[in-house]
Image: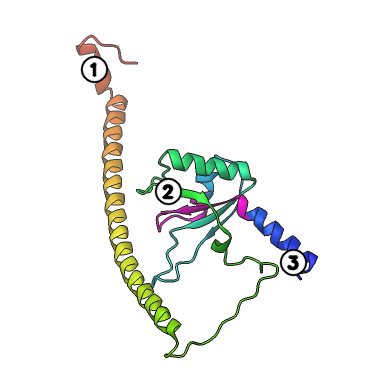
Amino acid sequence: MASPSTQADYAAFEEKVKRTVYLDNLSPHVTEPVVRSALNQFGNVKSVHFIPNYIEPRNIPQCALVEMEDLMQAEAVISMTSHHYFMVSGMPRPVRARPAEVNMFDDRPKMPGRTIQCQWLDENNPDFKVAQKIKDLTMLNAAQSAFLLKQQLQEEENLAKYQQDILNANYKKHEVIDNIMVDGTARRLADRYNLRCD
């Protein structure tokens, strides 16, 4: 039988899970301040925890657990992202949100009354082949994920370059307009064509 303090700790953890949102499809370039500023419009963000990517050679976070101040704020985030695209910091992929689950937390307390047993499997054990297949699938998944991540990063770099080029072109246009206003060319053209230039 679990002690009352263990049960209380687990109950508090379950409450934390209820007000936590799982964000997926984040850009590898997203940081904690970016997530905080994006979700602060729904309420107070208590904490942001990026979930480590254990199957990639590089630990690039693409999902996060965001704890809001209460359940209503968490539900607001989930509702908005399920009905509308929600771009974080202008990143090219829409972020998906859903309620967090207990098994997503690596720092979760021990569930009261639960025991876990581990054992080595002999090669003759029928479960050994199942474990081997799981291991092979995990390695295949890691290779596919690495390839997709490389493609995704390349697409984001191309998009960032495209957006920067557009920004630079717009800046040059505004600079030309400012220069025309400052040197009096706009006023002379307005006088010539009988237009108002305020």
Front of the two marks 3 and 1: 3
Residue picked out by circle 3: 6
- Label 1 residue SS: helix
The answer to whether 93 is drawn above or below residue 186 in the figure is below
> Considering the numbered disc 2 on the image, is that residue within a helix, a strand or a loop?
loop
Dot 2 or dot 1: first in sequence order is 2
Q: Residue at x 20, y 12 (%)?
A: 192
Residue 170 belongs to the span the image colors magenta = no
Which quadrant of the figure contains the C terminus? top left
Q: Residue furthest left?
A: 192
- Give the label on residue 188, or none: 1
Residue 70 relative to residue 28: left or right = right
Q: Do callouts 2 and 1 mark residues in contact (Cβ within 8 Å)? A: no
Q: Say which label, 3 or 1, has the lower sequence index.
A: 3
Alpha-carbon span between mark 2 and mark 3: 35 Å
Frontmost of labels 2 and 3 is 3
Compared to 151, does 84 lie above or below? above
> What residue lies at 38% left-to-right and 73% top-to-bottom?
138
Badge 2 density bin: few <14, some 14–19, many ≥20, Cα 10 Å: many
Q: Which of the labelled discs sits on residue 95, or is there none?
A: 2
The amino acid at mark 2 is Val
